[in-house]
Image (cartoon, helix red, strand yellow):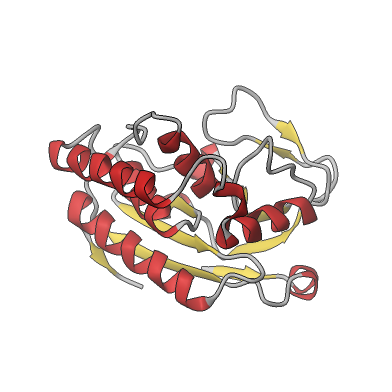
Amino acid sequence: MIQIEEPVRKAFPSLRVIDFQIAGVTVKESDLALEKAKAETAVEVRSQYTLEGLKDQPLMRKYRDFFWSVGVDPTKTRPASEALIRRVLSGKTVPTISTFVDAYNIASIRSGVPVAAFDADRLQGTTKMRFARGGERFLGIGMGKEVELKGVEVVLEDNGGLNAIYPYRDADRTKVTASTKNVALLICGVPGVEDAALEHARKLCQETVIIFCGGRLVS
């Protein structure tokens, strides 16, 4: 699904992603068994991390370093996995968005690795990872208006437009909704994150999504 363009490869030669698709999912508003799993995940997180020490965890530091390198301040815009973990450590619950989003959020929290997700039927052609062009406009999920990109961000783009600012904001145009049946997921690596960590995140994500949303792995 992802082609990494040469300028990005040259700048970040050890950056790796894992992409896969699950067909035939059922996306619901909520699920009682999933709520239990979210509560158990919160207990697990609070036993592993502290709010004060989270930023110094080796995995979190790698994502923060990548953010700085592409012009994003990670003290203001958190890597997705860190933001979720911080929310839990602050005493809040894992957010309830939909069974699909909640399921991959559990995987992201437990692995510490950000996950991106798209409605596979809304993707058009091959998705490329490239550097943004200055002045490009992007509308992310939950954003009230488009933002103008600086030209240093790493973005994902298919034939229909931008899919994401990597690895922290997915586009509204390809978001998963209640009518989504086929999903594409991306396990988001950055330089220094080992393959084993990404594979662990992939396994958690695949298993959790299929448990709570059904479907079958197709690639």
- Residue 155 place in picture, x, y as percent: 68, 53
- Residue 38 place in picture, x, y as percent: 27, 42
Whether residue 64 sits left or right of residue 35 in the image: it is right
> In this orientation, does residue 214 appear?
no
Closer-to-camera residue (25/49): 49
Residue at the far top: name it: 144
The answer to whether residue 197 is above or below residue 78 is below
Closer-to-camera residue (92/6): 92
Quarter of the image where the C terminus is located: bottom left
Quadrant in the picture for residue 156: bottom right
- Residue 112 place in picture, x, y as percent: 47, 56
The residue at 24%/52% (across/down) is 25
Whether residue 219 sits left or right of residue 172 in the image: it is left
Whether residue 208 sits left or right of residue 90 in the image: it is left
The answer to whether residue 48 is above or below residue 139 is below
Closer-to-camera residue (150/173): 150
> In this orientation, does residue 70 appear?
yes
Closer-to-camera residue (101/179): 101
The residue at 58%/36% (across/down) is 140
The residue at 56%/61% (across/down) is 59
The residue at 45%/50% (across/down) is 118
Picture mark count: 0
